Amino acid sequence: GIQVEQSPPDLILQEGANSTLRCNFSDSVNNLQWFHQNPWGQLINLFYIPSGTKQNGRLSATTVATERYSLLYISSSQTTDSGVYFCAVESWVDSSYKLIFGSGTRLLVRP
Amino acid sequence: EPEVTQTPSHQVTQMGQEVILRCVPISNHLYFYWYRQILGQKVEFLVSFYNNEISEKSEIFDDQFSVERPDGSNFTLKIRSTKLEDSAMYFCASSESGGEDNEQFFGPGTRLTVL
């Protein structure tokens, strides 16, 4: 099955700093989503981005499907951005509608 | 904005007991899913459900698990005889369609603790 790898596994930032999180996947995908898991464990949809670039406030994401990676950019980070960021993909190859999650990037933003 | 809801938010049970986790998907969505996340680990797919039947299930989803859509709004996950290793966060998700444009929306989760 498809493999999803996220980097870095852990990231510590000072408030106000920018960061880039990466998601690599091993095969063609028809769906890619980014989530933020908050300290209460809730999964918050950030982006549905199988290809192209999207922006939402201080967050933006780019997926280059032909090169099998996606990037999540966080600008001017705030302490409330802390948590775990997951990339999840759904694969044409598997012909299934399940999301395969990466292991996540754990972000801590210090005041 | 429509959202997926789940109840209860936290369930504590004794090993061997049956539990039912409940979900109300977004009303015009046709595909429903359960995922679980053991503490500190990644989120794992359990089962997908469409047109009143299971579309796909993972190897985790053994005979102890079942899903049901008992009415037009609820979607439930039943664990017949809970084990310690079933302790996890369980997420319900729904999507409008399958295939392309298949954004899945997740509920807030039910934290299951098996003692």
Image: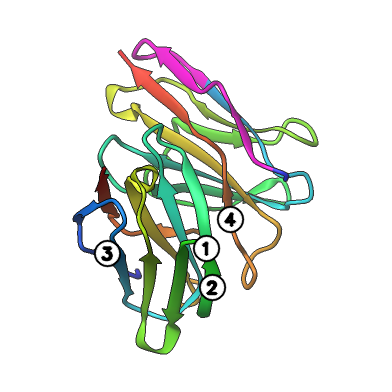
Marks 4 and 3 close (CB-CB < 8 Å): no
Q: Give the mark toward the camera: 4 or 3.
A: 3
Identify the amino acid type marked 4.
Gln
Residue B105 lies, with reference to residue A74, above or below; the image says above
- Categorize mark 3 by other alpha carbons within 10 Å: few (<14), some (14-19), many (20+): many
Q: Which residue is mark 4?
A: B104
Q: Is residue B16 magenta?
A: yes
Q: Which residues are magenta?
A: B3-19
Chain letter for the residue marked with disc 4 in the picture: B
Marks 2 and 1 close (CB-CB < 8 Å): yes
Q: Is residue A45 magenta?
A: no
- Categorize mark 2 by other alpha carbons within 10 Å: few (<14), some (14-19), many (20+): some
Q: Which quadrant of the rendered structure holds the N terminus of chain A?
A: bottom left
The CA span between labels 2 and 4 is 17 Å
In the drawing, what numbered circle is on residue A6? 3
Q: Nearer the viewer, residue A61 or B63?
A: A61
Residue at point 79%, 50% (across, down): B28
In the drawing, what numbered circle is on residue B94? none
The CA span between labels 2 and 3 is 19 Å
Q: How many marks?
A: 4
